[in-house]
Amino acid sequence: MFPSLKLSLSILILFLWGSPASVSASEASLPAGSIINDSVPDDDLTDEELDLLDLLDEEDDSENYRIADPVKYWNIAIYHFNDKLYFWGLKPLTKGYIAVTSKSIRSGVKNFFSNITTPIRLVSCILQLKIKNAGTETARFAINSTVGILGFGDPAKKYYGLKPKDEDLGQTFGFYGIGNGFYIVWPFFGPSSMRDSVGMIGDMFLDPIFYVKPREASIGITSYKTVNETSFKIGDYEILKAAAIDPYEALKDAYIQNRKKKINE
Amino acid sequence: MTLNKIIRVSLLLLLVAFVAMAYGRQPLETLKPPINNILMILKDPQYNDACKKNLQRDKIFEIVRGLFDFPTITKLALGKYRKSFTPEQLKDLTNVFTDLLGKTYINKMLSEFKDEEVLYIAEDMLTKKKAIVKTKVIREKGEMAVNYRMHLHDGVWSVYDVKAEGVSLVKNYRTQFSQILFKEKPEILIQKLQEKLKEQEAKTYVPQP
């Protein structure tokens, strides 16, 4: 008795609540009978809806969110390579890793790697003259390396409310108005742009792991870092792929939009 | 009057009051109850049973349908290509697009969300009829900034775009749609979405009790 009451109630609520949506749906279908409508689709949009369209369009033009893709065939090939790499290699590996480690260990490792890559963020903050953020990064490094025991803990955030500033050289270039250039997908590293690729190379030189000898050890550590990071992101790529009709385009657009947001921050 | 009747009547009264209230609401106030409601349904232990997952999903979908203005979302995602769609096609597209978005994202929530919290950060009124509500989703994996773009339509605020970490849902689909519509006819897009939806349903089929 009660479940059915609940159900009927929720349907009623929905009916009342959802009415504006359904009204415009029926509005859209109404002129189906009229002959003129085929060629004049603007008519079935209210002024308000056109306003919305204008709003989104304006934004697109001014911020130029589309990116050129002259090496599309290469990009698509590498996209498929990375896709297989993820589903056949990285994901099973990360699942095994999650099975044998606790969340606190993984968080600790994440903090540790975040701490030693402070130079990337610090240099980027300084170059963008974000002095306050540079101060935050310095304070975070000092606190977390000591009280946080080599960076495994994050007391700076926990007790002082100092959050890490997500900055890198690609964002720094963007901050100074350098455009994306064209879109490029790298094996292992994934989506990038010309600008961000140059930034990535710079970031590499600011990453202490790059200076670990021998080379194999450096690559090993980076791979481990990747697996650890992935343990916090498992499922994110899957949902993007599941909801997209064109996963390649969806990922490209998501990358560009996300970078734009980070640059504006 | 039996207890049941009393409950029914009082619920009905509550509902009337609720609907009356809804019409004077601001964007943030409109967004909060349904989202909190979804979080509550996600946490509700009565749905832990595998055979109740479908019911849980349907309930969340109902709330989402009430909050999101899917016809506008679809039109915005089509952009200038909406002109090549007949009203009939537009309706078909809206239906299949709504189902696809709802099914994939709700399934994701069902499989992943446990102790998520939503913080309401700000409500920016762009005009009298447009607003952005900024929220933060606190997940086990980390924080995620989620902004809702809302508009006032027939006296009710509804969502016409969601931005997660700067990625706008409408824009993301617009790039995908335009890639297809650049060379294909509207019915091909509808067909592609239908195929995708079938794929999703096949993957996430949960047997009814």
Image (cartoon, rainbow, N blue to C red):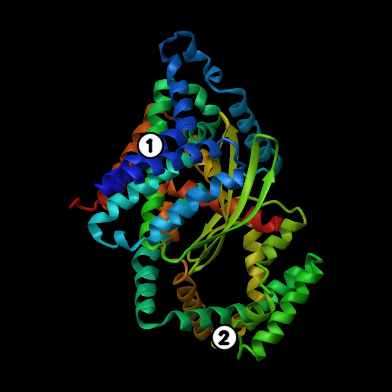
Q: CA distance from mark 1 to mark 2?
A: 52 Å
Which residue is found at the position 40% from the left and 82% from the top?
A101
Mark 1 surroundings within 10 Å by alpha-carbon count, few (fewer than 14), some (14 through 19), many (20 or more): some
User: Which is more toward the observer, A45 or B66?
Assistant: B66
> Residue B98 lies in what quarter of the image?
top left
Q: Residue B198 location in percent, x, y?
A: 28, 42
Which residue is found at the position 81% from the left and 70% from the top?
A131
The answer to whether B195 appears left or right of B89 in the picture is left
For the C terminus of chain A, give its image quadrant. Answer: bottom right
The image shows residue A83, relative to residue B6, as above or below, that is below
Q: Please, what secondary structure does the residue beneath circle 1 have?
A: helix
| Amino acid at circle 2 | Phe
Q: Does residue B52 appear in the picture of this structure?
A: yes
- Label 1 is found on which chain of the structure? A
Which residue is found at the position 22% from the left and 56% from the top?
B51
The image shows residue A233, relative to residue B21, as above or below, that is below
Q: Residue A47 location in percent, x, y?
A: 62, 23
Residue ID for mark 1: A12
Mark 2 surroundings within 10 Å by alpha-carbon count, few (fewer than 14), some (14 through 19), many (20 or more): many
User: Which is more toward the observer, B119 or A217?
Assistant: B119
Q: Does residue B158 appear in the picture of this structure?
A: no
Q: Residue A92 location in percent, x, y?
A: 34, 71
> Residue B14 lies in what quarter of the image?
top left
Name the residue at the top extreme.
A35
Residue ID for mark 2: A152
User: Which is more toward the observer, B116 or A60?
Assistant: B116
| Amino acid at circle 1 | Leu
Q: Please, what secondary structure does the residue beneath circle 2 have?
A: loop
